Image (cartoon, helix red, strand yellow):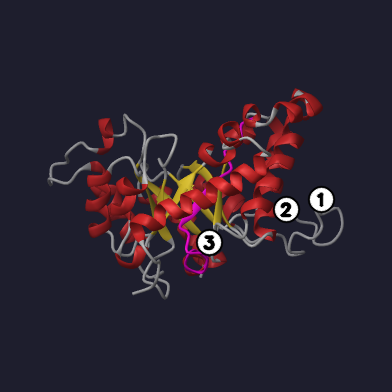
């Protein structure tokens, strides 16, 4: 089961860190931008990503690839997104596609098919599928971020394919952005906040899919920047694994995010994007060596608060 695989990789590496490949063209070193130019931006980003993946694949268990940065580069950017995801999986990393998809009915089913289908029957070995199975290649990811604010009929098409193809989703519950409370902290008639209601729904959507560590295929996005809300949700959602944004550039630190975790440092993975991708701008040296150093520093920082990660 994919959530068990992610947990086992976290325990093996003693590192609940997810490297966010939210790779803007502007993040690239000047020499790469000069060499490839705007016309070769997607290729430059792909090469940048591959070097970062090579540098961190033995340190971190997962990457999160934010599709907006690739959509901004057009058709070539989507190819870059696909190839980045596939390369990360080849290197043994769990891949989270950060796409925040949301719709209902047949449209939700198509979104789910795009990201949560099995790879082609040729197992992705024919890149263009001009020969072999004849099917178009799918995006190669393990988990997908989704927006649950259209309700259950906007989520069931995703969870159905999760069960069928050993995939998972992370539902937006309490996000890390400053204005999230404008909606998410409002009180409902039953006394719950909106984010508590969404968390309860995520826990329910995951029923019947628990892995051996007690977490389901339906996780939650819970920001590191809201420590008290995270503490509330961690106690409220015992079977829901957390994807935790907000560390680093958004102001979150290890002390703030400890409330996202259960006993033994279990139950979550912390994303860091700019702090790793752009580490070379502060550290000097090559971007990929700086990325590795930043990932190791983050591992040390998280360990200072969470201690040894182990199943209890």
Q: Is residue 276 above or below residue 301?
A: above
The image quadrant of residue 309 is bottom left
N-terminal of the pair, mark 2 or mark 3, is 2
Range covered by the magenta-colored residues:
9-24
- Kindly indicate whether the residue at mark 2 contacts the one at mark 1 (C-beta within 8 angstroms): yes
Where 58 sits versus 281, above or below?
Answer: below
Q: Residues within 10 Å of mark 3 (few under 14, many from 20)?
A: many
Residue 222: where, in percent of width, then height? 35, 47
| The one of 108 and 251 positioned closer to us in this rendering | 251
In the image, is residue 166 part of the stretch drawn in magenta?
A: no
Secondary structure under tag 1 reads loop
Residue that label 2 marks: 137
Q: Which residue is mark 1?
A: 128
- 10 Å crowding of disc 2: few (<14), some (14-19), many (20+): many
- Residue marked by disc 3: 167
Report, in whole angstroms, how far the alpha carbon at label 1 lies from the one at label 3. Answer: 24 Å
Label 2: which secondary element: loop
As drawn, the residue found furthest toward the right would be 131
Q: Residue at x 38, y 73 (%)?
A: 311
Asked if residue 113 lies left or right of residue 183, the reply is: right
Secondary structure beneath dot 3 equals: loop
């Amino acid at each position: 089961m994919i959530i068990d695989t992610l947990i086992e990789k976290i325990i093996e590496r003693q590192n609940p860190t997810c490297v966010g490949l939210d790779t803007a063209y502007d993040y690239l070193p000047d020499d790469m931008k000069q060499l490839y130019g705007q016309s070769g931006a997607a290729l430059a980003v792909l090469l940048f990503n591959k070097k970062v993946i090579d540098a961190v694949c033995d340190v971190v268990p997962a990457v999160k690839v934010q599709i907006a940065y690739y959509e901004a580069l057009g058709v070539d950017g989507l190819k870059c997104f696909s190839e980045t995801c596939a390369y990360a999986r080849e290197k043994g990393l769990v891949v989270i596609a950060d796409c925040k998809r949301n719709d209902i009915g047949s449209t939700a089913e198509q979104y789910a098919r795009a990201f949560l289908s099995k790879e082609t029957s040729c197992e992705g070995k024919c890149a263009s599928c001009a020969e072999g199975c004849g099917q178009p290649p799918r995006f190669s990811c393990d988990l997908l971020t989704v927006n649950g604010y259209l309700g259950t009929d906007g989520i069931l098409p995703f969870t159905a394919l999760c069960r069928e193809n050993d995939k998972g989703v992370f539902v937006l519950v309490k996000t890390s952005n400053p204005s999230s409370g404008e909606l998410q902290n409002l009180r409902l008639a039953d006394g719950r906040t909106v984010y508590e209601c969404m968390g309860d729904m995520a826990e329910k959507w995951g029923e019947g899919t628990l892995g051996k560590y007690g977490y389901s295929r339906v996780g939650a996005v819970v920001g590191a920047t809201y420590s008290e809300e995270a503490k509330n949700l961690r106690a409220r959602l015992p079977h829901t694994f957390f994807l935790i944004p907000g560390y680093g550039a958004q102001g979150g630190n290890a002390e703030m995010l400890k409330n996202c975790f259960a006993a033994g440092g279990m139950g979550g993975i912390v994303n860091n994007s700019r702090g790793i991708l752009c580490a070379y701008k502060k550290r000097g040296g090559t971007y990929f060596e700086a990325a590795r150093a930043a990932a190791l520093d983050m591992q040390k920082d998280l360990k200072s608060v969470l201690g040894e990660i182990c199943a209890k």
